[in-house]
Image (cartoon, coloured by chain):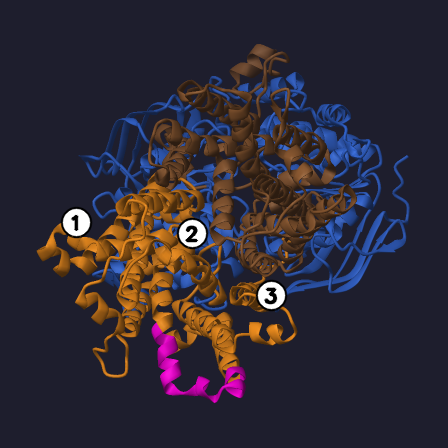
Amino acid sequence: MADTGPQPLVRMSGVTKHYGGVRALQDVHFEAHRGSIHALLGENGAGKSTLIKVLSGVVQLDAGTIEIDGNSVRFANPTEANDAGIACIYQELSLLPDLTVADNIGIARPPQRFGLIDLRAQRRLAEAALARVGGEGIHPQSTVRDLPLSRRQMVEIAKALAKDPKILILDEATSALTAADVETVLTLLRRLRDEGMAIIYISHRMHEIAELADTCTVYRNGQNVGTFKAGTKSDNAIVEMMIGREYESVFPPKPKRQSDASPVLKVRDFAWAGELNGIDLDVRPGEIVGIGGLDGQGQRQLLLGLFGTLIGTTGTVEINGRAAKVSSPQHAKSDELGLALIPEDRKGEGLMLPMSVRQNLSFAAVEKVSRFGIVDRKAEESAIDEIVQLLKIKSDGIDGPVAALSGGNQQKVVIGKWLMTGPRIILLNDPTRGIDVGTKQELYRLMRSLADEGKAMLFYSTDYAELIGCCDRVLVMYGGTVVRSLAGDRLTETNLVSAALNLPEGPNQATLALSALESAL
Amino acid sequence: MNAQVEAAGIEIRKRPARFGIRLSAAQRGTLLAIVIFAAMFAVYGWKQSVGLTPNVINTAANKGALLALVAMAQTLPVLTGGLDLSVGAIFVLANCLASSIVVGDPVSTAFGVIGVLLVGLLCGTLNGVIVVYGRLQPLIVTLATGAVYFGISLAIRPQPGGTVNFEFADFMTGSTWAVPHSVVLLVLVVLLIWVPYRRSVLGRAAFAIGSAEQAAYMSGVPINRAKLLAYALSGFLASIGGLLLTALTYSGAAKLAIASDYTLNSIGAVVIGGTSLFGGVGSAVGSIFGAFVMRTVGDLLIVFDINPVLQPLFVGIVLLVAVTLGSLRVLRIKNRLDLYR
Amino acid sequence: MKSILNQFDRATIIAFACIVVLLLIGALAEPAFLSPKYLVQQLHTASFLGVVATGAMLIIVLGHIDLSIPWTIALGGMMATGAVGILGPELGVVLAVPFGIFCGALVGVVNGLGVAYLRAPAMIFTLGMNAVAQGLMVYHTGGFAPQDRGTEFMRELAVGQLVPGVPNPLLIWIVLGAVTIFMLNRTTLGRRIYAIGNQERAVFLSGVDTRRIILVCFVISGACAAATGVLLAGWANRSYQAMGDPYLLPTIAAIILGGTNVLGGRGNYLGTVAGVILITILQSMLSVVQPQRYFAQLGLDLPADTFRQVVFGLVIITMLLVYGRTARITS
């Protein structure tokens, strides 16, 4: 049975890892036990990802020891770690998009006959693995590329479990899942724990950790700052450990009075390709309007559509009281419209990672600091200085590559790049995803101060707390249209959830809906 | 309860019908190449003055098989997301070597054949070693090794010439009951090399690497060995093509034009055969038909009485049309962001 | 000053160092290798490669490749020499050079439309255009090698010296190079070229029409290749079908040896300059030293081309192994 005795399954001690001159881990000690879920907490760049990369053989440690079951080990690559019973589910998917689900699940150790892969046995293996995680609806022969993101993540989890690991590591594995899938996965993890597996769990979602973990360890600046039994510390206390300073209120205060200026962005009957239907919305200067709802209800498409990347949108868009047909991002950012879009994927859509912070920052607004196509270095320099100070971007110098910055600072560069264009309307597509608490807090303040300057913001977030804390008003989307607008006292978590499920507003509806979900799955 | 959940917008995916035909992207590509080839060849047979006699078919098969072998050789590196610009040079090297050593009595001929194939394998392995352990871009590596292999071909055969065991040559290029031996050779290569390769761990690893190399590494795929094998097999297949060329011409010639023509056409054949140049999706069988499509273009020019010097023009147009057809999705796209992947 | 120093990254320095080493080794065998006359002659030869490499480099920085170089060169040369036949005896002489370059630019337009607007893979699309250009040129000559002569002006452009001591092609390359360095480093266009090579999606979402930039670069590349063709036709005083064939490998090799990333996004022009000079000197030394003579003494009769090809290939691989390696995949 579950053996939580003195002998840990994994013991890492004195682990140190440097990337170039940057210290990622410093003399870290870590233990994980059988039949226990161990949560790792910390801001991005605190060292938790590096720790699990060391444990799963992706990177090699500079100093220190790893023991599994009391035996000293050292992994040169992920395969060796797999063979030692360690399976890892990554935040960035490790799936092969062009291969079938079955191929993906069997990739590491496929069943073989006569030296060739036994496709039938592999398919059975895949079906069993999928059934185990509650993904029976996924066909083993479908190509991974054709699956929606949340299904892919379920395949990823099935793939890790097909290796029959003793130690299972989840690195932000639930961030792409729908609420129902998260429940399924959490239930599964509890069962695996009870079967004796050691589970190491990284998540930025505090409530998941509170629900799931037995033990928590907090990291900061590559060091272990405390290990404690789950439930023995308040959320605020944990966050303080993570950021290493007093934790004030996360969200800046909202202004009392709602602005009654005429809307700077007025959208009527906006539709596109069956994915967006009859959307009406208004955003006034100085207002932060949130967009909520379950993931994938057209929120991203709405922002992209307003920014001019979608072809064939219908309906009317008025900007500053004048009808505007936004034809391209180029048109969207023009002085006439003054739109800016902070995209969801900062690495793929927001930044040119190998290029310098300077070139990234001035990229969208480079016309503004150029004459006849020639960049005016002085003008560029002073504009950048201003933004770096405003956003408190921390880097080793603005001529270094933006890839070297932490996730939070990278996101600040994306935002800064758009502030340099002097936008009037800022569209934000889940900008705080995967960002540490400290930076999140800074971003909330920044948004509020931009609003106070009169900018209008349309802010999509997958985090309900964020919508409630930040927004003056939240539009909840469902099936490609806005089903409810919540503001003031009605802007509560229960109302958000019930609106997201398109249920009538009421105190008990949301809990009812959630329990319906749970029992159905 | 279920109705309520569905009302709640939670997607419950229906299991796809078991009896529906599931065609993968690679199978669709292969099928398309087969259809195009069949249509073109039918037109050719119809316009041909003598009709599709066994002789006509055999000639067409021999010409097509040459490119088909080189195109299969090209397919393997392309599937890993790489490229082999030296296939044409290996093909020519095998031709020059064969015109020197595939001679004499059956035993020495056999040794000659083995020697040629081993040299092909060696060239391919060398490409693989440099790409894998040198961690260099395949494009530039094979461009450079191609020059080396071609230089060696020149050393072997400074002037066109040489000879070959005639019985062996005639057997390779003949036909039995109207079935060209070169087609049998292609079928054997598919059954004995391609099919097992596809089903092997290293073969699937090649697909995995082409699909997403980083993810493949994280998944514990043997990346180095898989790439090495892909390039080595590529050299091997190209040398089979070189052998067949020697059998057809009874001689060897180190001409740069032949090497570059086959390299370029092999890439065209691979694309027409439905293999993605980005890797991860495709099939050597598709490449065979892609090669036959490319070759039939030339034949069609002849029967339509078009000046044969214009062949490059038409081959070029076929290539452009092939890639442009593949790009037609651009017209259907509704989100411009999808253009930039 | 700092920006100029930035141009000298590791690859550029190594390439320049290799040039010096090669010259010194050559000088041991033949002191004439260090004479100014020989060096200017080499730079003269290098400038043909340098001009075509300028356009090709832009394409590689964008993350694409232009394989239509060989026949675009031939097309440039043949259209310039054939301009009299096409445009008439009056205009043909005056407009020979711009007409040749214009035809190359047209090839670039088609390439650019295919790659940027149809999103066709550049490798295969430009390969197809190469074949189409070849077919058109063969059609133009009716299948025979024409004995088309270049105009006086083309001759002057290729062998004359506007500035005493500096052959005109070298002067052209210097001007073109200076403009390119300025363009890549100081203009919005340059910024955008590098950015597209790094992450085109982000560039599009930053409100830049990436397609137009790709189109412009392909047009530049076609024009540069055709310009090389025009210069070569003036130099040889005739144009012929295969005149571009020996240029594809050296062009790409020079760019890569100069430290430009084959996958796009990184590279600087001085590196390409170093790569071009290095390759030219290497080729020249192989033809001067004639290694086949030593082998002939050993009883091995090998054609000169063998050494050119083998040594060329080996040198490229060796130098790439020294500094062209990609990072090991970890995370």
In the shown orientation, is residue A67 left or right of residue C66?
Answer: right
Instruction: Report if the CB atoms under discs 2 and 1 are less than 8 Å apart.
Output: no
- Labels 2 and 3 within one chain: yes
Q: Which of the 4 image quarters holds residue A158?
A: top right
Q: Residue at x 22, y 57 (%)?
A: C80
- Identify by letter the chain in orange: C
User: A441 or B317: which is nearer to us?
Assistant: B317
For mark 1, give the secondary structure.
helix
**Label of residue C321 in the image:** 3
**Amino acid bearing label 3:** Leu
Estimate how packed mark 3 is, as few (under 14), some (14 to 19) or many (20 or more) residues with alpha carbons within 10 Å: some
**Amino acid bearing label 2:** Ile
Q: Which of the 4 image quarters holds residue C114?
A: top left
N-terminal of the pair, mark 2 or mark 1, is 2
Residue A343 percent location from the top left of the image: 42, 43
- The Cα–Cα distance between marks 3 and 1, rounded to whole angstroms, is 49 Å
**Label of residue C65 in the image:** 2
Q: Nearer the viewer, mark 3 or mark 1?
A: 1
Label 1, on which residue?
Answer: C86
Instruction: Report if the CB atoms under discs 2 and 3 are less than 8 Å apart.
Output: no
Question: Chain A colour?
Answer: blue
Which residues are drawn in magenta? C25-44
